Image (cartoon, rainbow, N blue to C red):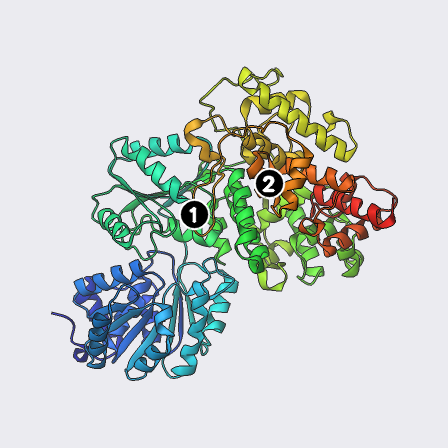
Amino acid sequence: MLFAPEALTPTIESARRVLKQYYGYDSFRPMQEDIIANIMAGRDTVVLMPTGGGKSVCFQVPAVVMEGVCVVVSPLIALMKDQVEALKANGISAEYINSSVGQSEQNSIAGDCLNGHLKLLYVSPEKLVSPGFTQFLKRLRISMFAIDEAHCISSWGHDFRPEYTQLRLLREQFPQVPIIALTATADRLTQRDIQQQLRMHEPQVFLSSFDRPNLNLIVRPGQDRVGGILEFIERHPNESGIIYCLSRKQCETLAQKIQQKGIKAGFYHAGMTANQRSAVQEGFLKDDLQVIVATIAFGMGIDKSNVRWVIHYNLPKNIEGYYQEIGRGGRDGAPATAVLFYSFADVMSLREMLTKDNPNLTQLNLTKLERMQQFAEAASCRRRILLNYFGETLPHDCGNCDICRNPPTTFDGTLLAQKALSAVVRMRERGSIGLLIDVLRGMRNQAVLSGGYDQIKTYGAGADLPYLDWYSYIHQMLNDGLLYIAYEEGYALKMTDLGREVLQGQRQQSMKKFQVAEKAEKLPRGKRAPRGTGKATDTGTDLYEKLRQLRKRIADEQNVPPYVVFSDATLQEMAAERPVSRVAMLGISGVGMKKFETYGEQFIREILAQGGAPTPDDAAAADQTSLGPDDEDTRRPRRTREPGDTHENTLLLHRQGLTVDEIAERRNLAASTIRAHIETLYAKGQQIRLEEFLSQSEYAEIMTARAQLGGEPLLRDLFDHLREKYDYFKLRLAGLYQKRLSGK
């Protein structure tokens, strides 16, 4: 029998009785009782709890004891279905209306609402704001609006959905009805934006601890992911787990490989029919399937409590999404493991996708990706990094992550931190990371001089350290919670209370030393060249020649001897090892931090273009994956040169309107090769759509930098002066364009 709404009055005591009778719990979790009391008092409420923290109870229990119906806005059909079925199983009257519900059934549900037979009605945001439905809601007595996954309303959030922005009309149409916003992942800016977007009236904000100490956090190199996953599953027999991939093809292929090992596995992605997805989800919830290999479409709102592990096959786009996904493991409080496979190729693929995905949010998305990359490459407690990101301080290392179990060498970095923090304060907390580094290093570029930062006391205080050292140290300070990034203020760095303690000498700050970690990747094919022998294996001979050609092009660009870029021994070791990640590349003898940042990506791209890492079963380590709306797998086979490669062929395709990537695809060449053709053609006087590669504002900035340096500066000096903002291709095109204008 479903719950009779008139049986109770809205008091904390009645809420406790509902919790026991319908949910089977003797007491509320920390903070839940205070949240419920605030809601029953009719006040707007913001609830931030990690996945599995008990957000749903916070609005479901008061919905039962309060008069009227609670309207819950939910973004996914699967989420609505699961929660409504769970409520009904508990004896609480609830229904949902979305695109999967027929008109006759909608009419029946509407009748139940009007008759006072429902306590909770779940709706999609599109349905909620439709004109006819809004009029229908005005005929009801509504106890509250509960906005689930509220981060979707903020363009600063990790899962922004335009349809959510229309929810602001709730305050206009229903000014007296309290609004409850709930989310598991929102940083400081997103939290504030949620309140503003929903026009909330002085909401009480309840911020639960985001700490999930039962989660064992591990980051592993991206080599041989398939082998690593199969080995992991074999060591965790009969344990339920989720593997997240970025493409549909990866999901299907990996699920098949797991099935071949006799393990019950299924895949789940948006390309499947609703019935297919439902069957897979049902099988997983019932433990008929041990493993689900899925895109991020799976998991939101899934209440399966016994997920013992979550694996990310690829690097997530941001920390919010990553934390939400790993939170689906260990919801019962028992130990669970979160494994992230990371390679630098992931970063390159995601950068390309994010720049195309939403041009208006490119800088925000790239900044958040950079924080995710820093987490993957971090040398400090991973849990502290996650909690600091969400504005929570963990006073000690967690002891339950790979870094805590194998701590790196540290030194007293208090003085370094104080220099940076002092500069942040003296810059009035208006500078970005790049600008802060320029001030510390005593650079005299336009941004420093126009801000008057060359006059502050800490100008040049860190001139003894190179750019990349400071870059790493500042990211350590971000990860350790001394600073945070104000995205809405031009990505300015702001100091936290913890940072203030360090600046004032009340707290010491440890820093991690620069050192290349021992490589964990094992090459399953071919043999390693002994370190320092300078001899590549036979399998690396062709690649070695390609790397030599790339080195020559770079050396010519910078007007330096090739050995200045990398020595022969370094290239030979690259050819033998085929490094396609940051860790692997830094493990090559002769590749230091500075050279990696200057040249590493180009050499990784060349290795990927020639077939990538030598593991045929794991070509995805290179992750040449489409990350667009359809998540289709577009991994390319090893490139083969077309006969008769000529600049004229490139010119012909360019004049047909094809982009660099399209020409590269058509000709089976690397995009870098096509750009070299474009450059040569333009230098020879051919008509090229220059605006496709270089904007007027970029040209103006590059010319200003040339003038500041004076004379004919080397590209290397220009590159450094502009803080590596523009690649050599743009720098050379700007120079060629200037020559054309001057008639030289």
- Note whether residue 508 is visible: no
Q: Which residue is mark 2?
A: 663
Q: Which residue is mark 1?
A: 631
Frontmost of labels 2 and 1 is: 2
Label 1 sits on what residue type? Asp
Seen from the viewer's position, the closer of residues 666 and 443 is 666
Which disc, if any, is residue 40?
A: none
- Disc 2 and disc 1 in contact, CB within 8 angstroms: no
Secondary structure of residue under mark 1 = loop
Q: How far across and how far down the image is residue 57, in percent?
A: 28, 65
379 relative position to 269: left or right: right
Q: Residue at x 45, y 42 (%)?
A: 314
Vertical position of residue 150 compared to residue 704: above or below: below
Determine which quarter of the picture holds residue 716. Answer: top right
Of the two numbered discs 2 and 1 on the same chain, state the one appearing first in sequence. 1
Q: CA distance from mark 2 to mark 1?
A: 22 Å
Q: How far across and how far down the image is residue 46, in percent?
A: 41, 69
387 relative position to 39: left or right: right
Q: How far across and how far down the image is residue 402, in percent?
A: 44, 38
Quarter placement of the N terminus: bottom left
**In the displayed image of the protein, which residue is found farthest to the left?**
1
Q: Residue at x 71, y 33 (%)?
A: 554
Quarter placement of the C terminus: top right
